[in-house]
Image (cartoon, grey):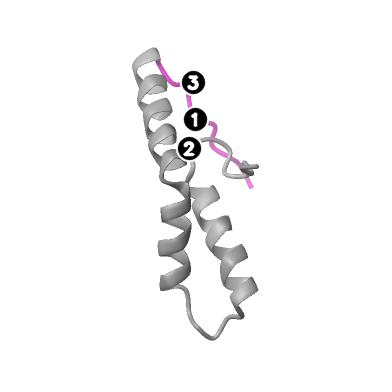
Amino acid sequence: MPTRSRPSPTAGERIDLDLAEAALVERYARLVRLTYLVLPTSLTRHRRVLTAHGIVQRALPGTGTRLLR
């Protein structure tokens, strides 16, 4: 299956990505809490916490596999 490679971002696009990432990281805890609340209650608490973190991490610009520590 062919994959599309994205062109390298220009300087202006890089700044925009940096600002977007900074905004997401700054609000990471709130985004996780909000995501936790909208997940189905049929999941266990532990599974909802892990899923909420995974969803927010995938929303970060970049590879989509970044983990915050």
Q: Residues within 10 Å of mark 1 (few under 14, many from 20)?
A: few
- Give the number of callouts: 3
Distance between the alpha carbons at the discs numbered 1 and 2:
13 Å
Image position of 54 (left or right of 10): right
Q: Magenta stretch: give its range.
A: 1-10
Q: Residues within 10 Å of mark 3 (few under 14, many from 20)?
A: few
Foreground: 66 or 4? 66
At which x and y percent is residue 66?
Answer: 62, 41
Dot 2: what SS?
loop
SS type, badge 1:
loop
Q: Quadrant of residue 3?
A: top right
Marking on residue 6 = 1
Q: Is residue 29 above or below residue 10?
A: below
- Asked whether 8 falls inside the magenta stretch, the response is yes
Q: Main secondary structure of the magenta part?
A: loop
Is 54 placed left or right of 61 in the picture? Answer: right
Give coordinates of residue 15: x percent, y percent. 38, 20
Nearer the camera: disc 2 or disc 3: 2
> Which residue does the numbered mark 3 point to in the structure image?
8
Is label 3 in contact with label 1 (beta carbons under 8 Å)? yes
Q: Amino acid at mark 2?
A: Pro
What amino acid is labelled 3 in the image? Ser
Q: Is residue 51 magenta?
A: no
Q: Residue at x 42, y 21 (%)?
A: 14
Give the percent coordinates (x, y) of residue 50. Answer: 62, 64
- For the view shown, which residue lies furthest in the bottom direction? 42
Location of the C terminus (image quadrant): top right
Mark 2 lies on residue: 61
Q: Callout 1, which amino acid? A: Arg
- Earlier in the chain: of badge 2 and badge 3, it is 3
Tell me the CA gap for discs 3 and 1: 6 Å
